[in-house]
Amino acid sequence: MDFDLRKLRYFVAVAEQRHFGRAAERLYIAQPVLSRQIRAFEQELSCTLLERTTRSVALTPAGEQLYREAQGLLAAVDAAVRRVHDVDRDVQRLVVAFSPGLHVSEAIRAFSARHPDVETDLIPVRWWEPDIPLRDGRAQVGYLRRPFDDSGMRTIPIGHESRVACMPATHPLAARGELTRADLDGEHMLDATTRRTASLEEKFELIAAGHGIAIVPLSVARAYSRADLVHLPLTDIPAIETCLVVPADRREKPVREFLDIAAATLRAS
């Protein structure tokens, strides 16, 4: 089904603001116009996306799904437009996608020092679909943790990262020095099968509120360190492999040269 990308952008603004007035201000349009556009969009899709009250706006299950899909779709469209402009201006650009907590900045600096003529961008990936920016064209290279779909990809192993159990500081296990997987038996675990969160900020807020424990990479736990959370080593859970990843059909010179530089830089870090 074809639909207006402008209406999709309007919907995303309302979904992010959860308020028609604030979304209208962000979009620089009148609130009644925005309301009409969203209703027309719902009619085009033949489903209700938003539950409206006089004070709030909430996403329906269909709206939640569309919001998740729309973020990647709109990002891919924006990336395609940027590539068109780059071609028109004869600009070389390298875009690197990275998993939360992984630091690729040193490799970017080393690459930029040798290739100042290539513009570089970074985009974070969503933890449940890390390879998607490589598949939809938003990025040429990824610095990712397994697991991810590596079909049609060239992967270069870089190293391994341990995982830790993240829990409220008030949890009975929080005073332990380390844990095993058996220590977590019976605990409510926050993962993709029990509750998919839209962001790591949401996940850690839920943990701090006592909604469960999560097993996360050590670098992620450190990046989201806060006084009301603790993270403990898990002695019997395998470490996660980290990799440089590139679509197998990408052979551009900047991509090849970045892979060489990044592989050496990241392995040494």
Image (cartoon, rainbow, N blue to C red):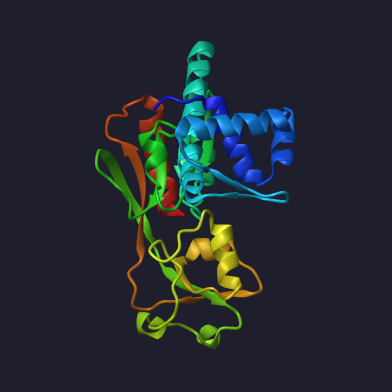
Q: Camera-side residue: 178 or 189?
A: 189
Q: Pick out the residue farthest to the top.
A: 88
Q: Is residue 266 above or below residue 40?
A: below
Q: Position of residue 249 (x, y in %)?
A: 28, 29
Q: Is residue 113 visible?
A: no
Camera-nearest residue between 75 and 156? 75
User: Which residue is depicted at the point 62% across and 44% down?
Assistant: 16
The residue shown at (61%, 83%) is 170
Say if 89 sits above or below 78 in the image. Answer: above
* Quarter of image, res 183: bottom left
Q: How many marks?
A: 0
Q: Residue at x 46, y 49 (%)?
A: 126
Residue 9, image x, y percentages: 57, 32
Residue 171 shown left or right of residue 269 in the figure: right
Give the left or right position of residue 225, taking residue 133 as reference.
Answer: right
234 displayed left or right of 206:
left
Query: Seen from this angle, which residue lies furthest left?
Result: 151
> Does residue 242 appear in the picture of this structure?
yes
Residue 168 image position (x, y, % from top left) = 58, 77
Viewed as shown, does residue 48 lie left or right of 134? Answer: right
* Foreground of the two, 262 or 194: 194
Image quadrant in which the N terminus is located: top left
User: Residue 146 or 62: which is nearer the viewer?
Assistant: 62
x%, y% of residue 41? Answer: 53, 31
Q: Is residue 247 above or below residue 50?
A: above
Instruction: Name which quarter of the figure residue 225 lies in.
Output: bottom right
